[in-house]
Image: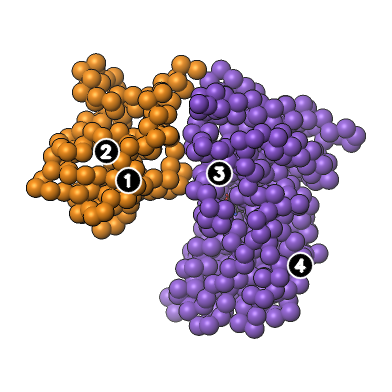
Amino acid sequence: MIDLRSLYQDVILDHSRNPRNSGPLEPHSHSANGNNPLCGDRIRVYVRLANGTIDNIGFEAKGCAISVASASMMTELIKGGGVEEARAIFARFHDVVTRKGDISEAEIEALDKLATLIGVREFPMRIKCATLPWHTMAAALDGVADDVTTE
Amino acid sequence: MTAVNGAYDVDAIRRDFPILGESVYGKTLVYLDNGASAQKPRAVIDSVAHVYEAEYANVHRGVHYMSQKATDAMEAAREKARALINAEHAHEAIFVRGATEGINLVASSWGRANLAPGDEIVLSVMEHHSNIVPWQIVAEQTGAAIRVAPISDEGVLDMDALEALIGPRTRMVAITHVSNALGTVVPVDEVVRLARRVGALVLLDGCQAVPHMAVDVRALDADFYVFSGHKLYGPSGIGVLYGKEALLKAMPPYQGGGEMIESVTFEKTTYAALPFRFEAGTPHIAGAIGLGAAIDYVTGIGFERIAAHEHDVLDYATERLGALNSVRLIGTAPDKAAIVSFNLEDVHPHDVGTILDREGVAVRTGHHCAQPVMDRFDVAATVRASFGLYNTRREVDALVDALGRVQEIFGR
Ligand SMILES: Cc1ncc(COP(=O)(O)O)c(C=O)c1O
């Protein structure tokens, strides 16, 4: 039971019920669609860039609690920051949730509020739920024309 | 084996399936994902092992003893498949990898030879992707058009709309016998009747029908009928395409290679007779023989008894789930088989699935390879419990209890 609670922490449930920065963002400079064909999760991420800074960000998601919470936290973490910083946070997060071996306290600490999502490490089928919003954000920043998928 | 007359002894049947004794996360496995793939009885497991231990070689090739034995065993399995669906000839039962390959075979071979620009293929909105995409591919290649028959809010095929859609340009009506996402049983005899009026052919996707009811392709007058072995308690990687002899004989080969030829020169190749013309390459020999064992197993119990038992479990599940305020049932047709699809208010199916899994309850969550159905009900996904001949009311209780756990975690 401890393991289910570690996946569905209150912070995650709160973000999934009351997602921050949800809704389309107009005007935006970048956007992308992401979908997970395995479970039908879909997300659209909108970014407004101004001088290399993420001036504003929004998303629309039809997805599970994990993907919506991850998207919500993502917007809080990268809004107002630089593009490179956003990519760096994604890289750290991606590494921690997908790496097979042990992770250190320092790595967890560096994740800030994303640390509540590391429970997905114990649920391999759910890791993609947590990373989908981030892949989609990165695709938006890259200006990738095609939709991204988790596959 | 447990096939006995009289009471349906589900506990004895369960003992035929070794995996049902396994536990997951310390809990007894409650396997309610039979629509995706069914578990295997000891008889099937033993039959596959026996092939490799005692009667294995390539088929239809060697003059030697083992090749003859394997060939005989495989052809005996074909005869069992014929009898299962009451086809006229065993050579009308083509061994394929599964329903997907069967449909692709017909779409590609029959479709490319017979479809012309403006011709129409009629499908229903509740088809599995494997009965949509092959038709889209051949439609693209031939200029044929696809028309889609709608369903009601209960998930019942709209027969009036279907009748209106089937017109003079309709060449093929390809429809599922039982919907994998909703459980709806389609009145396929009526579908065939509508197609006949305009001279169109009918392909029925029997994946979700064959495990649950007796099927008679001659009584249905189906032109093509497909099913997968793994949903019928047999091995994966083997399935059957039934086609009427005259139709199959007139169709060009699907794949070329060994086994499917009569003679090959670089000038001209002539093709083998049915069924081998459509079975290029070395087939899944042990799979076919294992499927034969699975057919023996289910027919030994009897479809009447299987259906009665499964309906009891389905009705009980529908009643118990329907009594939960937070549950929305998706697919409430009066005539259903073995499948209950639903959603919980405010909890995404994927989260439901993860929590049920930790309670030992295996269900499918997602779009069930039937995205148009999901769109029809305006959901991205559903939770689907699908029953087999070994499931019990007790397991439905376990499902409902596990849903209580979901509420605990997601409750406000
Ligand atoms: C109705 C239906 N048709 C076709 C298929 C495809 O079967 P297979 O993957 O065995 O080829 C399935 C399996 O999920 C199904 O349920």
Give the residue number, with chain letter if any, for mark 4. B190
Same-subunit check for callouts 3 and 4: yes
Whether A107 is drawn above or below B215: the answer is above
Chain identifier of the residue bearing label 3 in the image: B
Labels 3 & 4 near each other (Cβ < 8 A): no
The earlier-in-sequence mark between 2 and 1 is 1
Dot 2, how many residues are within 10 Å of its Cα: few (below 14), some (14-19), or many (20+)? many
**Which of the two residues, B246 or B321, is positioned nearer the viewer here?**
B321
Same-subunit check for callouts 1 and 4: no
Ligand 1 within 8 angstroms of badge 4 C-beta? no
Q: CA distance from mark 2 to mark 4?
A: 54 Å
Q: Indicate which disc residue B382 carries.
A: 3
Quarter occupied by residue B130: bottom right
Q: Indicate which disc residue B257 carries.
A: none
- Type of amino acid at the residue the image marks with label 2: Thr
Same-subunit check for callouts 1 and 3: no
Q: Nearer the viewer, mark 1 or mark 4?
A: 1
User: Helix, strand or loop at disc 2?
Assistant: helix
Q: Colour of chain B?
A: purple
- Type of amino acid at the residue the image marks with label 4: Glu
> x, y (%) of residue B66?
62, 46
Give the residue number, with chain letter if any, for mark 2. A75
The image's colouring method is: by chain
How many numbered marks are there? 4
Chain identifier of the residue bearing label 2 in the image: A
> x, y (%) of residue B162?
67, 70
Q: Residue at x 12, y 48 (%)?
A: A50
Whether B133 is drawn above or below B321: the answer is below
- Type of amino acid at the residue the image marks with label 3: Thr
